[in-house]
Amino acid sequence: MPNNEQRRAAAKRKLERQLVRRQERAKKRRTVAIIATGLAVVLIAGGVYFLATHDFSSGDAAASETTPPAPITIPTEIKPLAKRPTPLAEKVSCEYRKEENPAKQVNLPGTADVPATGTVNATLKLGQGEVPITLDRALAPCAVNSFESLIKQGYFDGSPCHRLSTKGLQMLQCGDPTGTGQGGPGYKFDNEVWPELTYGRGYLAMANAGPDKADPKKGTNGSQFFIVYGEAGLSPDYTVFGSVGEPGLKVIDDIARAGDDGSFDPSPGGGKPNKEVKIEKASIVQ
């Protein structure tokens, strides 16, 4: 049997072994803790980087690119053409004020003894089809006189329809050979309107730039015009000088349903038609 000294030595060795094992376990726990902390830091940093750099909207953007635009609602009822509350004399005088830098060189229209009765039939041949129009001298003799003169001089031939609007004011605007919305024939003339004037589907009207800066009592009509194919809650500041019937409106409706590029938003609104529109030939129908 082991004596006391031997038992004490064995107990001492056992204690030493226990202490070594405890130290090893503690060291291992510290190592594991360090590794875990490092992994957590890496994971957190990676998460922050992902959140900061990942574009969560890309999925929505891709979805929006593939989502077709909402269909355009177009009224089908043609608004009866307006009538002047007080008819004009059978012939009137017109004033066309000359300007610099015409979009296309033309002669000024005649100014004396301009007819203020009867109609003129014309056709706008677009790439999408023909648009027959009726010019009404009784509504706006000076506008009709100018428009007829420009057609006969080939001013509109080859010119784009540069602006389409599908919301609020539903119309197609043409008449600027430059296609910018800034071009004109080198002259301007006054509005031919009255306070009760309203607008609607089938109306042919002059576009303008508001009152003349040189004389606010004067108008700024030139060569640009618009065809109303739907809604038109406008103030009575735009000269109505003719109408477009159902055959022509079907051509315009098809152009409108393709929408616009929004390049004129927010003001004046709309944009270039998604379907390129050009007046290939404008002609008077005898």
Image (spheres, rainbow, N blue to C red):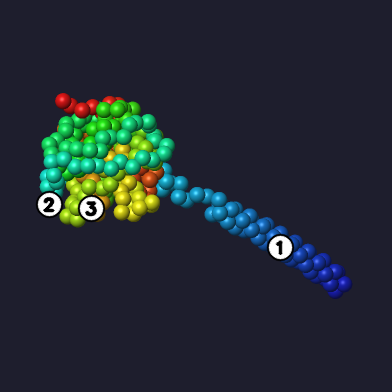
Look at the numbered disc 3 and give the secondary structure of its residue: loop
Q: Is residue 220 visible?
A: yes
Q: Say whether marks 3 and 1 touch (CB < 8 Å).
A: no
Instruction: State the residue in front, 257 or 157.
Output: 157
Residue tagged 1: 30
Q: Residue shown at 35%/50% (left/top)?
A: 212
Instruction: State the residue in front, 44 or 160.
Output: 160
Q: Where's residue 268, x and y in %?
A: 35, 49
Q: If you read the primary sequence from the N terminus, does the residue marked by circle 3 or circle 1 appear first?
A: 1
Q: Where's residue 33, x and y in %?
A: 67, 62
Q: Is residue 53 left or right of residue 203?
A: right
Callout 1, which amino acid?
A: Arg
- The image quadrant that residue 133 belongs to is top left
Q: Eyeballing the image, is 190 above or below 115?
A: below
Q: Residue shown at 54%/54% (left/top)?
A: 51
Badge 2, how many Cα within 10 Å: few under 14, some, many 20+?
few
Q: If you read the primary sequence from the N terminus, does the residue marked by circle 2 or circle 1 appear first?
A: 1
Q: Is residue 260 visible?
A: no
Q: Nearer the viewer, mark 3 or mark 2?
A: 2
Q: Where's residue 77, x and y in %?
A: 13, 44
Q: Nearer the viewer, mark 3 or mark 1?
A: 3
Q: Residue shown at 26%/28% (left/top)?
A: 152
